[in-house]
Amino acid sequence: MIIDGKLISKQIKEEIAEEVKQIIKNGGRKPNLAVILVGEDGGSQSYVSYKIKACKFVGFESTTILLPKTVSESELMAEVEGLNNNDGIDGFIVQLPLPKHIDENKIIEAISPQKDVDGFHPINVGRMSVGLPAYISATPLGITELLKRYKIETSGKHCVVLGRSNIVGKPMATLMSRKGYPGNSTVTICHSRTENLKTITQTADILIVAMGVPDFVSADMVKDGAVVIDVGTTRVRSDKTKSGWKLKGDVKYNEVAPKCSYITPVPGGVGPMTIASLLKNTLLAAKNEIF
Ligand code: GUN
């Protein structure tokens, strides 16, 4: 069965839009998400434009701050401070990656945890891992929402996560191993240095692939009946699309899909859920529900 992230994300956005209407009816103001975008990376520009469009769809205000790729670390820090102290902004994100001369960790640590709707600040990561209310990174949060809405059993299952990034792999492993649903899985994290990778993936009931390597997972690596979640979104050139680009997943969809009980396509799987989760986090921030 194909997991339709586009459909589920639309449902979530409609639920959020309904809540925004209620907030306004009760005399509140529109939630406001700010995005800082540094430089002109094509991928980042399109992700940010999707986020802004999604804000409009649900009735949020959005604020975009564009900075040149030559911006200094201290100038960027000053922008972050400005948003931390701006009462009109409920939550904000700094789109990654940042230019090499800027220390990403330093910038992330400068974001007020109360406004960190990306869930990247160590305070939010730590709170999540001990089970306290926290902003949770949007991609892993979106994946748990897909598992929930498709009522996929996770308890006692072997969940293999390919990739150990701070944004996806690590928080994903934490969420799948926590008590509760979705969770209670036995989790293995694999990465570029893992030996006998195929032997491990073949035992996965749930395989979550976030390597950023197109076509990494082939059919012989997947167990019959597995649930496969493909987080890969590598932009490759294409003469078949209007933009001249297309997104490629980490899984060889055509050969893997027939073996799966559930699988997410690329595009239309995890990607739209990431944006829906960011909106959800922003709504939580507007309602001060986490801190
Ligand atoms: N770059 C790739 N994914 C993300 C994300 O979820 N948030 C931010 N800020 N940057 C990203």
Image: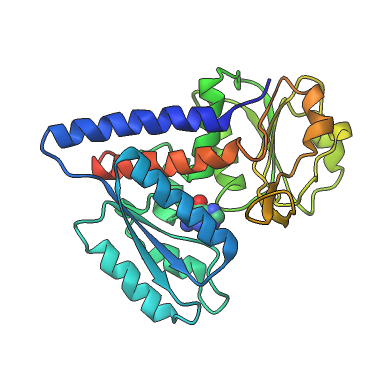
Q: Where, quadrant-wise, is the N terminus in this rendering?
A: top right
Q: Is residue 275 left or right of residue 199?
A: left
Colour scheme of the rendered structure? rainbow
Residue 139 rendering spot, x and y as whole percentages: 53, 43
187 or 118, nearer to the observer = 118
125 or 268, nearer to the observer = 268
On the image, which quarter does residue 94 sit in?
Answer: bottom left
On the image, which quarter does residue 26 sit in?
Answer: top left
Residue 31 rendering spot, x and y as whole percentages: 26, 46
Q: Is residue 76 visible?
A: yes
Which residue is found at the position 58% from the left and 76% from the top? 100
158 or 137, nearer to the observer = 137
Q: Is residue 248 left or right of residue 68?
A: right
Q: Is residue 285 left or right of residue 277?
A: left
Residue 259 rendering spot, x and y as whole percentages: 81, 23
Q: Where, quadrant-wise, is the C terminus in this rendering?
A: top left
Q: Is residue 281 visible?
A: no
Which residue is found at the position 25% from the left and 44% from the top? 286
Q: Relative to 130, does residue 163 appear above or below in the rendering?
A: below
243 or 79, nearer to the observer = 243
How many numbered marks, from 0 up?
Answer: 0
Which residue is found at the position 85% from the left and 37% from the top? 218
Residue 227 rendering spot, x and y as whole percentages: 70, 26
